[in-house]
Amino acid sequence: MPRTPLIHPAYAERFRCIGPACEDTCCQGWAVPVELVTIEKFQTLPYGPLRKLIDVNILVTPSGEKNSKPATFATMRMNTSNQCSMLTEERLCRIQAQLGESFLPHSCAIYPRIVNSIAGVEDKSLALSCPEAARLVLLNPHLLNTSHPRPSRSRFGARIEARQVPPANTLSPHSEFWPIRESVLALIRNRAYPLWQRLFLLGNFCRQMDGIAKGEFHCSISDFLRDFETSVSSGTARKTMNTLPVSRLQQLDFVLRLAGLLLQTSVVHQRFSECVQSFTRGIGNGPHATLGSLTANYTVAHDHYYAPFFERHPYILENYLINAIFRYEFPFGRGVMQSGAAPSMAHEHVWLITQFVLIKGLLIGVAGFHGEAFSAGHVIHTVQATSKHFEHCAEFPDRAYALLVERHLGSELGIAALLRNTEPAQKRRSATA
């Protein structure tokens, strides 16, 4: 059987929790799932203050009474401050401090690491809802070029392993996961194109891959990947993309509505509220503001503060997307490789774009609020607080997708309107959205 190089991100292994020095806590505002095996460990503890505290604050869920699924058996009680009851005044976990990491619920032990298993190979990425994880991912100019020494490297610099794979079904994307992901990563990192064009091309890539899987296009995946890379290298699509529409008004309206969906959830974290306040002030929100006046201010914020910053730091948004690719098993979607279900790569692309447009839109407003003082610290705050809010809002993906359909933004032209902020005649010196 052929041996295929597998690309792995190594940066997640370098994460270290900074404990009470962190500006946020992962123990606030979330349901902390406790699996049955962890409860059984707790039951072996001798009776004392910690055991009593644990027993009082373990809440068995209705489904947990009937089965032992790790994420549903029980949860930790939240206190009046909506924090885990195991948290000390110094914002440290009593369980870990007194018993060690082996007694932590699984989600607590691995957070913010996200572990996916693909054909028996583990991939680790990071949840950007953790401030330190967001810093580690976003602020590294060489995210995939920093890894532990390995015998071989991919062209991305991440560690690779050789693994035997069965002969590919040339029409099945499942058997070509690794080459597909390599093509996606190559496109996202290709600064010959502005970032918005890379994301637009990624949509074309996903739609055509769906067509191959459905038998609508009769070519092998390997042939398609080769032809796609050739097309990107030649720049044949650049002229067409330069004629795509710019609609900052539609873009801002969508961002406002997405933020509104998040603000409608039962628990709104203070850090996210601070981001939204900075965003709205940055686009000139006030009693007499109109969508037109907000859009004009949004444009100024983009052109004068957001774009210059990301021209100097193009890797930040690239890293955001790279981490999302690993985290969500893009363009397949988490769990699809295990289930064997047919992926909808176009749907995964829309979800990726929705997240990106929300983050980008908020960052534009925040940049407008801070002006020349806009910094990497403001980026980390915005990305972390927003990610924390939507990552644990289970209904957000479906509601966001419904909003996209309602606003008629799911087409190629709609996606372009959400991604593009520059006029066709403008030429920027380096890649930015």
Image (spheres, rainbow, N blue to C red):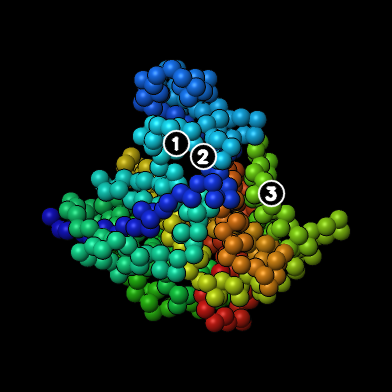
> Against 221, is 258 above or below?
above
Residue 97: image tag = 1
Residue occupying image coordinates x 40% and y 32% = 99
Question: Can you see residue 30?
Answer: no
Which is more N-terminal, label 2 or label 1? 2
Which kind of residue does numbered mark 1 sit on? Ala
CA gap, disc 1 and disc 2? 7 Å
According to the image, label 3 marks what residue?
A: 273
Decide if residue 93 is on the left or right side of residue 333.
Answer: right
Query: Is 61 drawn above or below residue 247 in the view shown?
Result: above
Closer to the chain start, of discs 3 and 2, is 2
- Residue under the image location 65 percent in, 38 percent down: 267
CA gap between label 3 and label 2 equals 25 Å
> Disc 1 vs disc 2: Cβ atoms closer than 8 Å?
yes
**How many C-alpha atoms fall within 10 Å of the one at disc 1: few (<14), some, or many (≥20)?**
few
Reading the image, the residue beneath label 2 is: 92
Percent x, y of residue 180 = 33, 59
- What type is the residue that disc 3 sits on? Ser
Binning the other alpha carbons within 10 Å of mark 2 as few (below 14), some (14 to 19) or many (20 upward) gives some
Q: Quadrant of the N terminus?
A: bottom left
Q: Depth check: 337 or 152 in front? A: 152
**Could you say where residue 329 lies in the image, as x and y percent from the top left?**
38, 51
Disc 1 to disc 3, how far (Cα)? 32 Å
Q: Are marks 3 and 2 in contact (CB under 8 Å)?
A: no
Residue at left offset 59%, top offset 72%: 309
Residue 16 on image: x %, y %: 42, 51
For marks 1 and 3 on the same chain, the one whose residue lies earlier in the sequence: 1
